[in-house]
Image (spheres, rainbow, N blue to C red):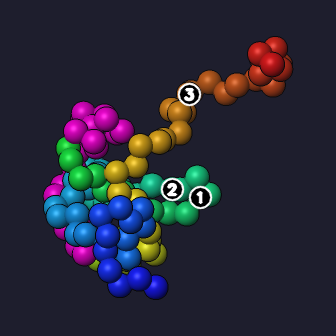
């Protein structure tokens, strides 16, 4: 294990602190709650963004958020059983539609 950080190291041992993060939240009748997500394999995760523009690009301009440091976000997520934090995700699943895709329609597109 390397204890030194080099400029060209693609996987440094120590990550630099991200500073204050933009954390997506949901509005409820009593205030705001942490918005949680799932990884492609179904694991629950907390998500944060290093800039408001990055959050808006992925979740939309109307997505409410709060500013938290990483340790505070981990403290909020931990009681929910969430140990993973994804920073600046860029990929997401397509939007769910109200009408299901019919098998015969899907076969016709192959």
Residue 31: give x, y in percent of width and height.
20, 56
Q: Residues within 10 Å of mark 1 (few under 14, many from 20)?
A: few
Closer to viewer: mark 3 or mark 1 = 1
For residue 109, side relative to residue 77 (left or right): right
Q: Residues within 10 Å of mark 3 (few under 14, many from 20)?
A: few
Q: Residue at x 17, y 64 (%)?
A: 19
Does the residue at mark 3 contact the one at mark 1 (Cβ under 8 Å)?
no
Q: Secondary structure at mark 1?
A: loop
Residue 75 in magenta stretch: no
Q: Which residue is mark 1?
A: 42
The image shows residue 56, relative to residue 13, as above or below, that is above
Mark 3 or 2 closer to N-term?
Answer: 2
Residue 76: give x, y in percent of width and height.
30, 72
Q: Which residue is mark 3?
A: 97
Residue 98: give x, y in percent of width and height.
56, 27
Please tell me the numbered disc located at residue 38: 2
Residue 97: give x, y in percent of width and height.
56, 28
For residue 14, side relative to residue 103 (left or right): left
Give the magenta-colored segment's residue range: 53-73
Q: Residue at x 77, y 21 (%)?
A: 106
Residue 80 appears in the rendering? no
The image shows residue 92, relative to residue 110, as above or below, that is below
For residue 32, side relative to residue 104 (left or right): left
Q: Front-most of 45 and 51?
A: 51
């Amino acid at each position: 294990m390397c204890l030194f950080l080099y400029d060209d190291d693609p996987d440094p041992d120590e990550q630099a602190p991200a500073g204050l993060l933009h954390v997506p939240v949901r509005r409820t009748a009593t205030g705001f709650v942490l918005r949680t997500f799932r990884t492609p394999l179904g694991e629950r995760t907390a998500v944060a963004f290093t800039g408001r523009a990055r959050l808006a690009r992925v979740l939309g301009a109307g997505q409410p958020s709060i500013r938290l440091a990483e340790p505070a976000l981990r403290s909020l997520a931990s009681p929910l059983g969430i140990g993973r934090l994804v920073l600046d995700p860029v990929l997401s699943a397509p939007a769910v539609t109200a009408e299901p895709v019919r098998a015969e329609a899907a076969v016709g597109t192959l």
